[in-house]
Image (cartoon, rainbow, N blue to C red):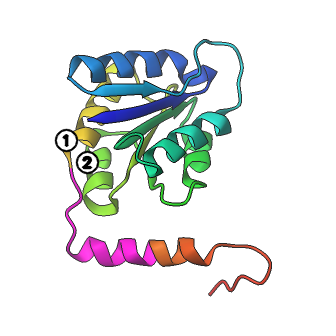
């Protein structure tokens, strides 16, 4: 599987580690940075990974910052991204099964390398179940299509 990885400075070390884990498991990794511990802005990396997934440059994405929140918000701003911030393998599996999440967000200061490996493995080994969940995804797509801006109706 082709995976897009991106992280800010706080997530750099965990990104490097998980990218190596993914490569060792036979996945192709596209690394969108950052490439060191110097301070950078997480939105750039969340957007880059989100766009890569939506544009078909990668099948799934992984984004990492200190707590995973900011970079997950950035990724979710890209239409078509369903980024899930996960703290357990169970949650990551469920995100794929029920929400068809296509980007995984992690907090480098929230989970250790071992737990992050379990989360990544669960994210990659699960698939969307469809069925009743497809109806819910359709509703999310409707919300996304309406957008928010001048004249947008929120009900």
Residue at 75% in and 73% down: 149
Taking depth in this image into account, of 114 and 45 the one nearest to the observer is: 45
Total tally of numbered discs in the picture = 2
What residue sits right under mark 1 in the picture? Answer: 125
Quadrant including the N terminus: top left
Q: Of all residues shown, which one is farthest toward the right? A: 150
User: Which segment is the magenta one?
Assistant: 127-140
Local secondary structure at mark 1: helix
Q: Is residue 10 rendered magenta in the image?
A: no
The reply to whether the C-beta atoms of the residues labelled 2 and 1 are less than 8 Å apart is yes
Q: Position of residue 13 (x, y in %)?
A: 49, 15
Question: What secondary structure is marked by label 2?
Answer: helix
Q: Main secondary structure of the magenta part?
A: helix
Q: Which residue in the structure is indicated by mark 2?
A: 93
Location of residue 60 in the rendering, given as x and y in whole percent from the top left corner: 36, 42
Q: Nearer the viewer, residue 106 or 25?
A: 25
**Where residue 28 sits in the image (x, y, percent)?**
31, 26
Image position, residue 94 (x, y; %):
27, 54
Q: Is residue 139 left or right of residue 32?
A: left
């Amino acid at each position: 599987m082709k995976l897009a990885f991106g992280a800010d400075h706080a997530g750099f070390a965990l990104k490097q580690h998980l990218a190596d884990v993914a490569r060792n498991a036979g996945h192709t990794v596209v690394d969108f940075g950052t490439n060191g511990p110097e301070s950078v802005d997480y939105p750039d990396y969340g957007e880059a990974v989100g766009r890569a997934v939506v544009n078909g440059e990668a099948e799934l994405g992984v984004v990492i910052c200190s707590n995973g929140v900011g970079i997950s918000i950035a990724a979710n701003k890209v239409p078509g991204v369903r980024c899930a911030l996960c703290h357990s393998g169970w949650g990551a599996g469920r995100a794929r099964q029920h929400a068809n999440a296509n980007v995984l967000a992690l907090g480098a200061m929230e989970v250790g390398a071992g737990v992050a490996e379990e989360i990544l493995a669960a994210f990659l080994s699960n698939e969307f179940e469809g069925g009743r969940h497809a109806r819910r995804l359709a509703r999310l797509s409707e919300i996304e299509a309406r957008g928010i801006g001048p004249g947008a109706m929120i009900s």
